[in-house]
Amino acid sequence: MIPRDPMSPPVRRLEIGWKPHMRDARGEDLAHKIRTFLGLQVACVRTRDVYHIEAPLSDEEARRVLHEFVDPVSQRGALGRLEDEAFEVAVTVAYRPGVTDPVGRSALVAVEDTLGRRLGDGAAVYSSTLYLFTGLDATKAERVARELLANPLIHTVRIEPYEAWRHAEPDLSVPRVRLRAEPRVEAVELPDDDAALVELSRRRLLALSLEELRAIRSHFLEAGKDPRRRELGLGSHPTDVELECLAQTWSEHCKHKIFNATITYREPGRAPDTIRSLFRTYIQGATREVERRLRERGEPSWLVSVFHDNAGVVAFDERVHLVYKVETHNSPSALDPYGGAITGIVGVNRDPFGTGLGADLLVNVWGYCFASPFYEGALPRGLLHPRRVREGVHRGVADGGNQSGIPYGRGWELFDGRFLGKPLVFCGTVGALPVEVAGRPGHLKAARPGDRIVMVGGRIGADGIHGATFSSAALDESAPVQVVQIGDPITQKKMFDFLLEARALGLYNAITDNGAGGLSSSVGEMARDPGGARIDLARAPLKYAGLAPWEILLSESQERMTLAVPPGNVEAFLELARRREVEATVLGEFTDSGYFHVLYGERTVAYLPLAFLHEGLPEMKLEAHWQPPVFEEPQGPPPEDLSQVLLAMLGRLNLCSNEAQARHYDHEVKGLTIIKPWVGVEQDVPAEATVFLARHGSWRGFVLSEGVHPFYSDLDTAAAARAAVDEAVRRQLCAGARFDRIALLDNFCWPDPVPSASNPDGAYKLAQLVRACRGLHEAAVAYEAPLVSGKDSMKNDSLMGGTKISVPPTLLVSALGQMEDVRRAVTLDFKRAGDVIFLLGATREELGGSEYYRYLGERAGLAQPLGGVQPYVGRRVPDVRFEETRPLYRALARAHGEGLLRSAATPVRGGLALALARSAMAGALGAAVDLEACAHLETPRDDAALFSESCGRFVVTTAPEDAERFARLFEGLACCRMGEVRASGRLVVRRGARTLLDVEVAAMKRAFKATLRDV
Amino acid sequence: MSELAERLARFRALPEQELARHRAAVRALVLTGLGLNCEAETEAAFRMVGAAPARVHVLDLLEPSGWRRLREFHILAFVGGFAFGDHLGAGFVLANKIRWRLYDELVAFIERGGLVLGVCNGFQTMVRLGMLPGFDGDYRTPRATLAPNDRLGYRDAWVRLRFDPDSPCVWTAGLERLELPSRHGEGKFLAADEATFARLERSHQIVARYVDEQGDPTEAWPHNPNGSAGGVAGICDPSGRLFGLMPHPDAYLYPQHHPQWTRRAVEGPLPTEGAGLALFRNGVDTVAAQLAAT
């Protein structure tokens, strides 16, 4: 804590706790975690909320505030400190200076409301939490603080034994930010020597390559001769503002350099290929090809806006388009799981909100890749335990979504040891963009010269500086503390509510979010339409004084949007903002000068030609080398008791229920959820896909699903990509989505694919990326499911504690489908005894990368080495034969159209056995199945029949009277009537005379739910 | 049938057109802003039962022009959400704002005979303000609280409710049972003392209780999501016009909101509307019947 400044207003400390008869649920929850997670004994934990109010309050006012803050029924409180029964240790967890404290912000509002006056700019309330432990000594309390309560990047911890506590005065220090520095701008000399140049980039965390640094150096040498630049007081070296702005704009995060690189791809026995931009060739290429085919058939395109805005836009109905974006927030979540994750979800909310003229937010999605929460191995220094990462991430995204009033639609988790170094935290949001906004097309936006640049929402602090460049680098111990941010959903919600009103009034011409790169990115991007921008950083509202201009420009402080407001509307816009208690500030104006002109007061601090800023980046040239990997098949005979195997599989982390965490997320606020994430008799089995309305008053809906197969990547990323698309599409069809209106999003999370001394196999990882793109392209075109948006995160490696851990190449494919009438949606649960069960699609011996092989490896007692692959990867990875799947899917869509489906599930991870188990568990019904009759079961192995993860399959039930009609739709296709639903309560699977499975449905459910029930 | 239910039944016996006309005259103010989240579905609910709802931003209502506006309405809905992020306790900061900047007007609204519905965050806000339980016309003294759930944290899951048939609550007249989603982290109802709880029971102000599969009130999780004593899920004031409920009737507008609708659809045609609407219709028809009588 910084010593108090005698000039600061006095500080009042309020301490609030429960009355003695009240339960302290937070204390009990912590005690439970201390016992179960840390294995420590503790008698009792009591908790208190503490508020430090830094403002000139009279004693009477302070008492009034206390009276207001305490709930008279359940709480007691004191100015200073509450009297306490004896305890052993007091632990206070407070925020570090500058860390977002949303509770403190709300408390300030309450203080001002209570007193009926504004407290002025210097006033603040700081929240902290006090834990009083009985039956736990100071050393152990320190461990509890370190491992459960506090993160040194954002928290301070004070540990006081009872005696010391009792005799000390209450602590009145507050984490006020005090920066001494006068705002300074300096010219940065770019040395002629290349090594010195690289060193400069490293030291300033610019993450620029030598080629890029050279391009910048020569640009300024030339620009220094420009008299206009000289008139503005700038020379032939960049200012720090210019250099930072370029580094940010040119970061991998913002410019996707790897996806735009020219790549030479080599593979044994084939001539090398040259790929000019993976993005243009395969991602955009797939979408163009789909559009071309539509045109060829004379069908109108349903793509409204793809690739150039913050999120993809597709046509939905006459009133709204749908907008969808999925992002990742991996590195911040590794450092501070809660803050990183909440920032991830409220951050991705701003993408649809900043698309076109702004979309209403409808549904969030999340998906996480973690190491096992039960991990017991050594933890490299600097890494948090995966159980804690998982818990913090869940809490962060749940809080972010719940407080924003946005339900979640999809939520999944995958576990592998390689996510120990960096978890993957995918967050996405679907929005509804009005087709027309105040008489204009809602999807079009463009700032015009003369439009004012208005920043709306939160203030700017030092938080998140270098986020864009940081996320473009491997995680190591030098990560700056400032990268940690904590999103504040309430500030954002207030801003969104205000902006929706401004949107309806047509008050602005363009809107975009301030995410990575802050104003530098938002204004720099928006300036491309009018052809220039001029902003004055001295006008920007700051959280505290002392930020350098380049920090103001790059700060990634959250909850901000940048808008282009025509001069005639500025007054109305600012007035509405004032009425809604939202901060809005005119920072400058858009111009057609061709320059991004940044001032600090009168002084020019950056003068960058837009052409150089956006197009000056030298193209990257990379080499990719593919070498098919070779892995072993599992040794020894397969297990004999496959029923036991099924129970074990159901309890595996990658297959079991995560309902205990998922229920913490709202899934039905807004009243638009039609198929919820959890379905079945007891609503405890995850839906194959979820279904939502876009608004009240229309039955047209949209369908959400996804596919992700990082474990197939160990064998072939092309197959992994095809399988991911196929799974996402199959899930859509299960729910009843149209086969011809599925839009896809791609999110690549890759280990660094650029070779270097610390990354010797970069060329192989790049080859994996090339192959993934090819697989994605092939599948998207095959299903005519265009890619409408995506994101890549290319440095998912950790070097913490000197151990390199890289994630397996992970491609998440998210699908957004459409339904004419959601009342026809189908769920996976068996509905009635007597219903006929069909298996659609071919089952092959494709166990490579399967969950079953992972199970066999563990069963054999083989461990996954730190950073390495699973012991049993196998050889034959599941793949898709589009010539088989397309007609099958069309037939299924037709069967749905004719109303023949009672239930539909799709075998994915865990194979056919798991699909049957899920349908049975959800319906609380048994089944009798015989696989003997299935002509498309192309394996003699019983374990493979049950657990192979072959793509392209469905498990479908029909009413008995519809079975024949259903079967006729599939003539000539892989369709097998394999059994019927029974009221027996047992899942029985035979293969002729052999019984492969005979398991009680209730036992399956117990196994399915046990693993993560308390974690 | 209770007297309340009979009165509503008499009104509903009017010809369809007349009913629609009277209902359309009922104006419901749906609060929005500052972290409230359920304004869209609440507005849809009032509209679906024939009333004329309007969303009003809390900050607009705090201004003198907003006070005047409040006088045009018959029903005020405190919707669900996370006003100010539930910081300092659910409903706390919003209730505080209202207490200092609106409350006299609000009490006047109640005394004029206005109806108030508070769902989830709205219920928390009403209790915090002292609007409920509202003994003896005192709408300013907090006599209860909604404490953190025994099982810490927010949770979204459907629960079963049973209503007190002898309750004066106009919103639940004639309703016996309802399944609704419970979506909160602070819903454990606690009266200030035993006398208060006893009085609530005696005067049938405990309108709604969580019940188990047999239909009996329960304190056990998960049927009771928060551990509230006696399974209390919602209470009304002695007049029955003010009602607060933790689970969300605004989340059951369509039959397809029920988590089991795809199963029920196999058994036979689904009802024409979601069961939660009955509650809104009761509130609206109570006002409409009065309007029709004058």
Image (cartoon, helix red, strand yellow):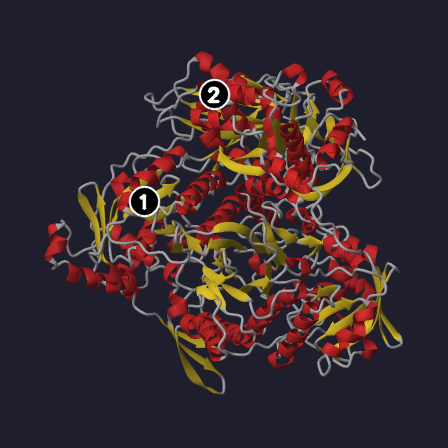
Q: Quarter of the image containing the N terminus of chain B?
A: top right
Q: Is the residue marked by circle 1 packed among few (<14), some (14-19), or many (20+) residues within 10 Å?
A: many
Query: Which residue is disc 1 drawn over?
Result: A454
A11 or A760: which is nearer to us? A11
Residue located at (60% from left, 66% from top):
A728
Q: Is A628 in front, or is A577?
A: A577
Vertical placement of residue A397 versus A702, above or below: above
Which residue is drawn at the image coordinates 77% and 81% (left, top)? A935
Q: Position of residue A400 (x, y in %)?
A: 53, 44
**Looking at numbered disc 2 in the image, what kind of residue is underneath it?**
Thr
Left or right: B24 in relation to A986: left
Q: Can residue A733 be seen? A: yes
Q: Is residue A130 left or right of residue B248?
A: left
Residue A831: image x %, image y %? 79, 60
Residue A208 against residue B92 in the figure, above or below: below
- Residue bearing mark 2: A114
Of labels 1 and 2, earlier in sequence is 2
Looking at the rendered structure, the secondary structure element under dot 2 is: helix
Residue A463 in the image, given as x and y percentages of width and height: 39, 43
x then y, percent, for residue B215 = 82, 38
- From the image, which quarter does the C terminus of chain B lie in? top right
**Which residue occupies 69% across, 47% down?**
B273
How far is disc 1 from disc 2 in space, using C-alphas? 32 Å
Judge whether A179 appears above or below B192 on screen: below
Which sits in the foreground, A151 or A734?
A: A734
Q: Residue at x 36, y 62 (%)?
A: A255
